Amino acid sequence: MSTRLIRDAGDNETQLHVEIIAPELSTRIYFAPVRNELQLFQQWDNLRSMVNRRLNAHLSTRGRMTLIALLRYGLNPYPSNNPITIYISVNYESEEEHWQRVIDDIQSNMSKFGYPELPVHIEHNVGIHVADFELVSPVGDRREIQAKMSAGNLRIDGDYKEKIDLGDPIGAARYVEKGKDKGNPLSGTFGCYIEIKKKGSSVWEKYGLTNYHVVRPAFTGFKLEVSDMGKTEIASPEVRSNLYRVDNDGFKPSSMIPSVSFECPPRIKHNFTIWAINDEISQVEKYQAQMLSGGTSQQEKATMDRLDAEKRDFVGEKTAKLAHFNKGLHTIGKLYAASGFKERADDQGRLDWALVRINKSRVGSNQLPGKETWKRWGANAPRLTYDKPLGQQTMSISPNPPTGMQRTVHGWKLGATTGATAGEFHEIKFQVDLADDRHLGVQTSTEIAFQSCDPNIGPFSSRGDFGSVVYDELGGIVGLLFRGQVLNTSSRLIYITPIEHVFSSIKGAYRKDEIEDIRSTTHSGEHWGIGGLYGTMTDKWQSPADPLFWVHHANVDRFWWSWQILDLKKHAAGNVTLGHGIFIGETVKLKAKLKDVMHIKKGLLCYEYEDTY
């Protein structure tokens, strides 16, 4: 409604975005000691032990507890009026999406053993660290470090993000061996969120999609070595290392091979950012020293005040960013599955992908970049995709596209290093041999190559962009970027895997026929952040009673109707019949079938949309 008022006023540029956040996530929380509860105090030792046992009974919280406390805890600024609550904190490796099940189990056992019915609150919190996050400072003189920082887009301006969105930088949450020293692991790009539906389940499980190269440093056996020329290279893993096993066999959802967590921003960007802030503070202090040796005119005093303000800003930025890592807020989730190096598609193209299970508190969106981001690309900008969510596949980059699907030779991506770029495909496939997997003795592959549609503006991709998804002119996903090569002319060829091959390979990582469907997600992100700490909109029983549920699903329905109007000849998902019943939940019985709700002006429905996308 507000956007329409803006348009009616003659403003066709301004876009109004509304963010709705649960009060628990933005309002100050108050707590106080529990007083004068003698019976509860007598029970507390046994109750606390029971809570700890129940935490260890669940994989998501086993060994991850950092505190179990009894507090008066809530939003009331008079803390003694807040409810008595069992407060539980866990480290950032605990997956938030499973907490409600843990809470239900704890409360069930409280009732079973005659304890009072108390609210239970779980949150990520690792307490005050004995040791701060270890920084590894960049090596080289100031000019060399600045050049590397600029080439890799390693300086992060502004606050570190709380949510992980399409195109953000990610990396393994550990340092790797680099000769006798510690080195930063490789970093890459968070491609997008996808959802997987297993047979017999109504739940779409959400994962982050990226490139296998990006996740390799998470395994023991990954090392960097410095050549005689001083160049840093990836060493071949030892045959008995975990990395060699995953390179060879892939990483299945049921794999017991340990891997570290992942982080955003990656530590290489954090290290360079802190170096850059320190450098900027040093420059300000140098100018301050010069000013002190000069006069004290009014103009010089104003300059000194400005320098003082700049220094305060830099110090504040540094403090906040150090605290982000010191508190463990950079951790985003754990590896769920990965392709390894040996798998090939039917056309002998490499299959190079990884899925990360993102902590629910950090789940962001698949929104594509808007007009401002694409300014420098001029006529090559994808105008039909601005600020839209990434769409399902409707076109293919393969020379032999799936039946009924057209081929596209143009694509766009958002990467962590080069940002938003436009490119074009070569119509034939190239023979490729990568140094990364020669230790396995694998055959060469044939790959779809891509390059910038205007090298004068910039390359299509560079280091740190691996893992980006590529999309078409309508915003539909078409491929996953995995590697590239710089030709002697300094232009880059980039290799892209068709997304239909990636999805097929992901299905193969599970037991036979376990996966019913895979899709890029445009729907469920809003459910996680609305309606309280755990989001009532994630609960299919509570969400229909939430007014915001209706607003959200009205927009989902608009997306669906826009898709119907397109009348695509080939759909990314499998087909169902018009006689298929509508499913909401295990105990909700509906007589309506798909044919009753397929048209907004027929059957059970009667309405229309003022505009579609």
Image: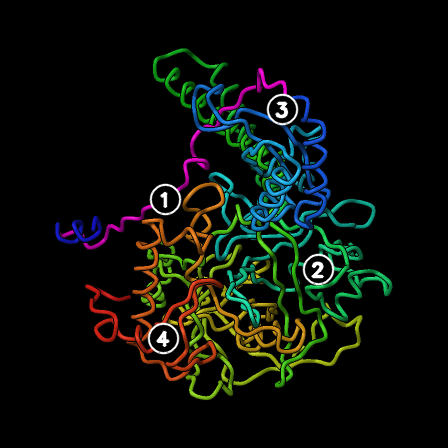
| Residue type at tag 1 | Ile
Residue density around tag 4, few if under 14, some if 14–19, many if 20 or more, within 10 Å: some
Looking at the rendering, the stretch of residues picked out in magenta corresponds to 10-39
Marker disc for residue 593: 4
Q: Which is more toward the observer, 131 or 277? A: 131
Residue density around tag 3, few if under 14, some if 14–19, many if 20 or more, within 10 Å: some
Residue density around tag 2, few if under 14, some if 14–19, many if 20 or more, within 10 Å: many
- The tag earlier along the polypeptide, 4 or 1, is 1
Indicate which label's residue lies in the foreground, 3 or 1.
3
Q: Is residue 26 magenta?
A: yes
| Residue type at tag 4 | Lys
Above or below for 593 versus 4: below
Residue, disc 1 = 20
Badge 2 marks a residue whose secondary structure is helix
Quarter of the image where one finds residue 299: top left
Residue, disc 3 = 40
Q: Position of residue 533 (x, y in %)?
A: 48, 41
Indicate which label's residue lies in the foreground, 4 or 2.
4
**Which residue lies at the image location 69% right of the left edge and 40% below the top edge?**
136
Q: Distance between the Cα atoms at labels 4 and 2?
A: 46 Å
Query: Is residue 323 in view?
Result: yes
- The tag earlier along the polypeptide, 3 or 4, is 3
Indicate which label's residue lies in the foreground, 4 or 1.
4
Q: Distance between the Cα atoms at labels 3 and 1?
A: 38 Å
Q: Which is more toward the observer, 77 or 126? A: 77
Residue, disc 2 = 216
Indicate which label's residue lies in the foreground, 1 or 2.
1
Q: Distance between the Cα atoms at labels 1 and 2?
A: 37 Å
Badge 1 marks a residue whose secondary structure is loop
Indicate which label's residue lies in the foreground, 3 or 2.
3
Direction from residue 175 to residue 163 in the image, left or right: left
Marker disc for residue 39: none
